[in-house]
Image (tube, rainbow, N blue to C red):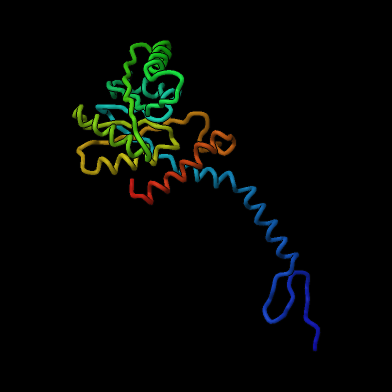
Amino acid sequence: FAPQKKNFFLYEKDVWKLKWRFKFLLIVLFLLIIYFSYPAIFRVTGSFLIADNDNFETADLLFFEEEFSSKEGIKLCNDIYTQGKCKDIIFVKIINQFNVYSDEQEELFLKGTIDSVYKDFPISFLNLETEHPFTLNKSKKVLELIRSKNAKSVIVLTNAFHSRRTRNVYRKIFEHENIKLYTLTYFDRFTDNNWWQTSDGFRMVIPEFLKYGYYLAKGYM
């Protein structure tokens, strides 16, 4: 039999097969692509979860959700209030029975802290007892309050990485309601440009991405 033709990369048999050198180069090339492109991949992942801020003139109610002790979120609430865009600001809070302090103590502390920075900034609290799925059940109870106040336009202010899921859940709930929904977002300790650089960022974004898929599969939004 004639000897098989060989070269540095490939050899001929019944079918062309890759030699280990070429396989090794492919693996190295793949790892280099991942190394140089992972920031862009993470950035797109984070950006997907963020809803666009809506433009509005005025609204009847503003609901501040998630980390309502956030400086950025409170400042945005105050800006909206002082500009006369909304006069009724409500902090939505899920009751935590395992805290060492009561909900009343937490509210007093938060109000005192806010009053020390922003004068004449009125807020109220909506304390909710809810079960899984939390965002869906919380939104349904918020709708009950909206109906009781006969509000026709509401702002939902929430953490940017939670905003797309929140907006879509509210849109689903408001589907047959005559209520105008505006979504506003804020960043806290990290943004879509650097969330993967901290453990807190991973704990926020990765679970939120999984929850988004779960809510979508269950038809909650």
**Residue beneath the point at 56% across and 45% down:** 40
8 w.r.t. 167: above or below: below
Task: Work out which quarter of the rendered image holds the N terminus and state it.
Answer: bottom right
Snapshot quadrant of residue 135: top left
- The correct choice, above or below, for 180 with respect to 15 in the image is above
Q: Quadrant of residue 62?
A: top left
Residue 88 percent location from the top left of the image:
27, 22
- Residue 54 rendering spot, x and y as whole percentages: 34, 35
Residue placed furthest toward the bottom: 1
Q: Position of residue 4 (x, y in %)?
A: 78, 81
Q: In front: 101, or 143?
A: 101
Is 3 on the left-hand or right-hand side of 219?
right
Q: Is residue 202 above or below residue 30?
A: above
Which residue appears at 33% of the width and 41% of the height? 169
Residue 216: where, in percent of width, then height? 38, 49
Number of marks in the image?
A: 0
Left or right, residue 193 beside residue 75: right
On screen, residue 85 versus residue 108, left or right, reads: left
Front residue of 99/52: it is 99
Front-lying residue, 57 or 11:
11
Q: Residue at x 59, y 36 (%)?
A: 197
One can see residue 221 in this view: no
Looking at the image, can residue 89 be seen? yes
At a point 24% along the width and 27% down the height, the residue shown is: 60
